[in-house]
Amino acid sequence: MMEVLIFATLNGLVTGLLLFMLASGLTLIFSMMGVLNFAHASFYMLGAYFAYSISLYTGFWPALIFAPILVGALGALVERYGLRRVHKSGHVAELVFTFGLAFLIEEAVQFFWGRATKSYRSPDILDFPLFTLFGQNFPAYKAFMIFISIGIFIGLYFVLTRTRIGIIIQAAITHPNTVANLGHNVPLIFMGAFGVGSGLAGLAGVIAGPVLTTFPGMATVLGSIVFVIVVIGGLGSLAGALVASLLIGLLQSYAIASNVGMPDLLNLLGVSFERDHPLNDIWRLTLPQIAPIMPFLLLVIVLIFRPSGLFGKRES
Amino acid sequence: MSLLQLEGVTKKFGQTEIIRDVNLTIKQGEKHAIIGPNGAGKSTLFHLISGRYPVSSGSIHFKNVPIHNRKPFEITRLGLARSFQVTNIFPLLSVFENIRCALLWSMGYKYSFWHLLDRQRALNEKTESVLEEIGLHDRRNFPAGELAYADQRALELGVAIACGAEMILLDEPVAGMSHSEARNAVALIRKITEGKTLIMVEHDMNIVFDVADRISVLVYGEIIASDVPEKIRGNPRVQEAYLGEAVEKPLIDSTGGGESA
Amino acid sequence: MRKAIIWILFAIVLIVLPLIFDSILSISIFNQMCIAIVFALSYNMLLGQGGMLSFGHAVYFGLGGFMAVHALMKIEYEEMYFSVTFIPLIGGVFGLLAAAFIGSFSTHKAGTVFAMISLGVGELIAASSLILVSFFGGEAGVSGDRTYGPTFFGYDFAQDIQVYYFAAAWMFVATFFMYLFTRTPAGRMANAVRDNAERAEFIGYSARRVRFISFMMAGFFAGIAGGLFAMNYEILTEENLNAATSGRVLLMAYIGGLGFFIGPIVGAVVLTLINSLLSNYTDLWLLYLGIMFLLTVMFLPRGLTGFLMMHTVPWQLGKLRTLAIPYTLTAIPSAVFLLSILAMLEMGHSMDSDFSFFGVALNPASYGSWIGLIIISSAAFFALRLTLPRLRSAWAEANTLPAVVSETVTTEGQQ
């Protein structure tokens, strides 16, 4: 039991931090530009694919550096030539644009790389168990993922709060016009922010690809969960995104690891139902079964009781 | 009979007090102006009365019914309408549709999806007459967002009064208008608020002294004076608020042709 | 009076269409169009008319459809005596109930929050449908048979042509009622709330209530579309509830044009054609659809209908003809550019060395083909850029009112 708890917690932490890496970029872009980037998870997918292709020639480590940069550059281009043009048509048009972009990127990935799953593997140097507890291994690569994630956040926090550009960005988030009037090139800042946000998503893809498998559907799988996180945490709140990411990562992990389900609950209550009872499906539900839909269940519950999310601010 | 009563109304945003302990009584049929330096909180006061913001403390009663902290649509349905300082109409709808929508609730249509609007004679006739009154009849099919500024202000006014409210709040109705436009607007305001109660926020002193029965002066969220126009003119505290010091001679020519302070 | 003529013409077209195009494929495409039109129009009640962007509208379509199939099964096993002609109504009612439940907590805000809630709810229900096997049938879905139950004036729905007239009739009626809705207080206030939700509150309306009503109406008509789907295909699966279907209806409405009532109709027709015909010619049709969608969002934000409507002013001014030459001059390099890009994409996708594009033999392995296409496309692109200024000035000219020297202008200036 203890080992299940420890490993489930660790795995949940890995997933949660990864989700936060995606959610934080999304939140930053939303706070600054008011647009929820549907294609954010697509940049994550591109990061994995670029890293895969680069690693075929150079191995994992150069890919870790260059793939996110490529994705970030692509993101900046998208902002400059696509999003900026659509910006004047309003928020709805921007959302629809990023939705179309997500669609296009998924098709483009299938065009260039095909539909099969890519065998993008973690580097051999990290391919050992970090520790063994109660007979189960915890791969060093996962620990590496945790360290990278935490390192990125510390770096991001440092840049945002201690450097000049960070302060300018913080100001531009709430008062872009004032910042422009002070002489800063706000469009350039936006392009840079979008690029960095996308690059971060790409980085998440680079390190997650080996673990979560690299295939054309990886953006859709993660994409909706990331949006759910951002809404549950409260649109525009980084703290909320962190809490929601960890919450969902851990909850899913525990759900998958456990074998508890409705039958156990019903047994406890001494209730049982016929085999062909109309609601039989619900009575036979187990936690591992509902693990994939837990984020959405949580979303609906949170929104019913707290419409602005956990840490929600006023909608921009 | 007092129509609107504010008692001890306070509004804080975070730690900052914008409205401090405001007490105000408006009688039925009164034309009341609220003046004060910029940033005094006049628009905020309107937002509190019309339901856009909740009060931090205190109470607001309209027709002896508490309206503080209620939703704007509930307050409007009780008979209190307002216009906005920054034009706030329905830009994609035509001028005609703007007015017609403003009339819908007061004519009892509620959320009906079984009445065909074009067939409602009384509704359409009333819309036409409101359009005539505000002088926009010949532009009835223009998308509201494409009107000239003064016309948009007239439409703004029209939407506010169309629903036949007993009390109308006008927030700087002639802001940004030229002299002649403002003159026309004031004549329009007087015409359409006949028999109704009016609260107006305004900077132009000529208009204020022309229209108002009583004036309240709001400075830093407090009402420092509330009286008939003549008494306000000579009030040293009011002069101090505007000029920084009291003066001996009244600055404003009582014959109404002078310059504003 | 003019409006009545349009409706009559519409009805005539619907009646006559299968007599002109009478192949099995055509009838099948028409049926798909009818379903798509009702679905897309219901979606536009939310987006174009209400300003509510939903990423989960397929839920009401799918739920309505599933309920309809279950009803078909009940009729087949004689547990219910009901003419299948009214099956779409069952779909509609179930869609309405679902929308009433989901709308109760999701219509408080419009904008981004609404979009995200719709996405989450859509995913939740689509995923749940694989778990709740008894109602949704798991991966295989639920299937039924429409040929049972009492016949309707001799219709037993065994033939496709009967299904067409059935679908067309329902589509006509649904379109008519959705049109009428836009002319009611609830429909108009939906527009007002879209334009300025705050001001709508200050004229006595709860913006939330207005949105909720639109939401339920949209759910009702989406359910009807689902019922039509059930009758046409006799099977519903999880795919009909999922995000891809929701995305498809968004595409239809957007490409057709959100700001016009007929926009979604245009979008539904165009997208159904692309869906059924283009997919026969190329594997890459989804990629092209994505590109087309993105280009529409960037360059034609008012959709195809909007693009056509842009020409009303020149037409009224009688200047439409002046655009003919500039359009042709721009169209030729555009077409060349487009075709060369398509050739490169198709060539890159195909592995054959004897690949041919519209009769021109190209070899994916040789550099010659690639270099040739790159040169052609670049040249076409630059030629295209060169024609744009002329198009722009012709367009401005075609929209200018003829100069009128007015005496009132001079007298006003002297006041």
Image (cartoon, rainbow, N blue to C red):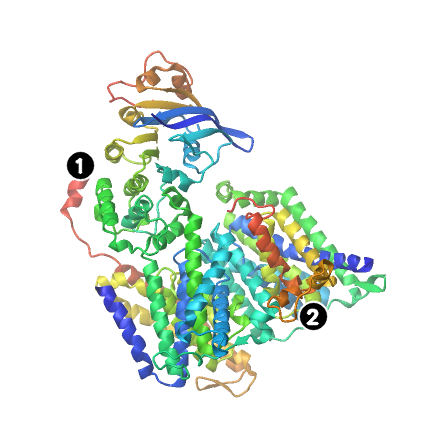
* Kind of residue at badge 1: Gln
> Which is nearer the eye, B127 or C300?
B127
Find disc 1 in the rendering and name its residue. C415
Percent across and percent down for residue C232 are: 44, 77
User: Image height check: is C388 above or below C366?
Assistant: above
Asked whether C83 or B156 is in front, the reply is: C83
Give percent across and percent down for residue B234.
Answer: 34, 15
For residue C232, side relative to residue B260 (left or right): right
What quarter of the picture does the C terminus of chain B occupy? Answer: top left
Label 1 sits on a secondary structure element that is: loop
For residue C244, above or below residue B99: below
Residue B113 appearing in the image:
yes
Judged from the image, the secondary structure of the residue bearing numbered disc 2 is loop
Chain bearing mark 2: A
Which numbered circle lies on residue A120? 2
Place of residue B230 in the rendered image (x, y in percent of width and height, measured from the top left)? 31, 17
Q: Nearer the viewer, residue C292 or A235?
A: A235
Quadrant of the rendered structure where residue C150 is? bottom left
Cα distance in 3D space between marks 1 and 2: 79 Å
Extreme-top residue of the structure: B248
Mark sitting on residue B226: none
**Image quadrant for the N terminus of chain B?**
top left
Q: Which three-letter amino acid code belongs to the residue tagged 2? A: Tyr
Q: Is residue A85 visible?
A: no
Do dots 1 and 2 share one subunit? no
Q: Nearer the viewer, residue B101 or C86?
A: C86
Residue at 25% from the left image edge and 46% from the top image edge: B127
